[in-house]
Amino acid sequence: MNFYQPYIRRVLLAGFTLLWLGFAYPQKKITKTVCAKSIDFVEINATQCFKVEIATHGHPEIKIMVVAGGEYQNDILISAKEEEGSLFLSPGLRPLFTNPNDKLSMHKILSVALTITVPENLAVNILGASTRITAAGKYKVIEVRNVEGDVALKNIAGRVLVNTVSGNIDLTMPSGSVDAYSKFGKVYLAGRYRGTNNYVLNTVKGSIYVNNNE
């Protein structure tokens, strides 16, 4: 059997599930803006999200948007806790929620997509699960830890650390040094890179793709 077949089936199943959720239930949108004048670190718990998109801008505020679909979308909230210069975000189900149908996995009855924009030069930490993560912009440091989901880095600057179990890592890089390692997958490096940015990419089963921004 082809090594990639289980992952292809999983992606197709997730796609059909999300399409069904979109037709069956209208989507719920939640927006939130946080003043970031005193914030220098943001941690995002995205384990209940199927998709995360993060970028930076030149304004002292953090803009958050969650789009939820599915049977329990009204139980979604954005937990935002600020503590000593750090902001801890966790979009997902309310704390006291109990699944009335334990036989169904939550991803089959709920979809959560997070879009967030943060000021440039912050430190950011993202924790995912089966989460497709896309990151762009300028950071002091950004660290991404994911399990199955793919991670796409587009025109990203700063110190970038990515670790996945089976998710692929795709880096479109303007400049900087790259340290890429996959234990069981493959690493594709296109071109030579120079610059002040630093990228450390690691995966167990996934593959890593690096190319120039040309």
Image (tube, rainbow, N blue to C red):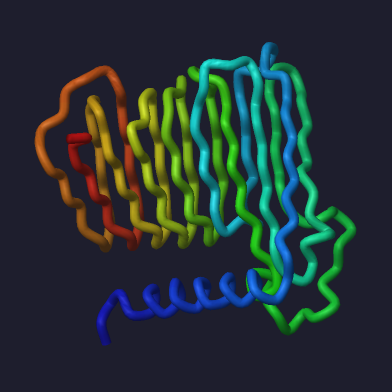
Quarter location, residue 111: bottom right
In the picture, the quarter occupied by the C terminus is top left
Q: Looking at the picture, does residue 53 appear above or below residue 214? A: below
Residue at the image position 41 percent from the left and 80 percent from the top? 9
Q: In the current view of this chain or complex, which residue is farthest to the right? A: 96
Residue for point 34% across, 56% down: 168
Q: Quadrant of residue 115?
A: top right
Q: Residue at x 61, y 53 (%)?
A: 113
Residue under the image location 50 percent in, 72 percent down:
15
**Location of residue 103 in the rendering, given as x and y in whole percent from the top left corner:** 73, 84
Decide which of 19, 121 is in the foreground and name it.
19
Measuring from the top left, give residue 173's x and y in whole percent. Answer: 26, 34
Image coords of residue 2 (percent x, y)? 25, 82
Q: In this view, does 177 lie to the left or right of 130?
A: left
Taking 128 as reference, is 192 left or right? Answer: left
Q: Where is residue 21 in the image (x, y as percent from the top left)?
A: 65, 73
Above or below residue 1? Residue 3 is above
Front residue of 200/33: it is 33
Relative horizontal placement of residue 167, taking residue 124 as reference (left or right)? left
For residue 182, above or below residue 200: below
